[in-house]
Amino acid sequence: QSVLTQPPSVSAAPGQKVTISCSGSSSNIGNSFVSWYQHLPGTAPKLLIYENNKRPSGIPDRFSGSKSGTSATLGITGLQTGDEADYYCGAWDSSLSGVFGTGTKVTVL
Amino acid sequence: ELQLVQSGAEVKKPGESLKISCKGSGYRFTTSWIAWVRQMPGTGLEWMGVIYPSDSDTRYSPSIQGQVTMSVDKSSSTAFLQWSSLKASDTAIYYCATHGPYSRSWGYWGQGTLVTVSS
């Protein structure tokens, strides 16, 4: 049972921007770095953002992350059809266990 | 190049045992945490736990504790996820992951192992 809450879905037209929220608590996001993952069905998840706002090599700057208090946000600008996927936030909680968000499906209209 | 290669799909009956694997290469296996993540049909990613190969320090998710066993074989740079008695509810895709240079996150993933438990 995930303790990080995300909206089930977001959508926008190609070229537009979407933001995905991830809401937690002081026992997880509030005291942990947040990471974000893109997951296409049948493939391995891909790390998009680590340590709240850093991009791994090869991830375009269309993807951005931020954190404030017990919430985090992933932004995707210049939306492309290839961005259609499920997106998950991740963090650690106070019991030293990892946790993922509930997941958000991004649809490009 | 850092790679995690998982064992192939499995079809098992309830009550049977199973051990799936995740072989790491291209990095220092013993000093990198390995995580296991599952995706049950129609649901999202679920954290199962982590293991530190150097000393087999293991942290299980409270919801998973007691249901599976994580282990490693340092000599072959391989991590394992094991069940002693499978249930239909164990049907899922299981992923292993490691962090690489991306601290506190999972930058490298195996391709996933589909486990189907059905009578």
Image: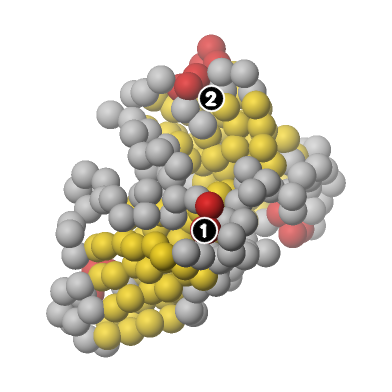
Closer to the eye: label 1 or 2: 1
Three-letter amino acid code at disc 1?
Ile
Q: Is residue B119 above or below residue A79?
A: above
B90 sits left or right of B108 in the view: right
Q: Residue at x 28, y 50 (%)?
A: A54
**Residue A67, position as x, y percentages in the image:** 39, 62
Question: In the picture provided, is A96 more to the left or to the right than B112?
Answer: right
Residue B20 appears in the figure: no
Hey, which quadrant is residue B40 in on the image? bottom right
Crowding near the residue tagged with mark 2, few <14, some 14–19, many ≥20 C-alpha atoms within 10 Å: many
Q: Nearer the viewer, residue A47 or B15?
A: A47
Q: Is residue B91 visible?
A: yes
Left or right of A6? Residue B82 is right
Residue at the spot of label 2: B78
Query: Please, which chain is the residue tagged with disc 2 on?
Result: B
Secondary structure category for the residue under label 1: helix
Point 62% across, 18% down: residue: B55
Q: Which mark is residue A29?
A: 1
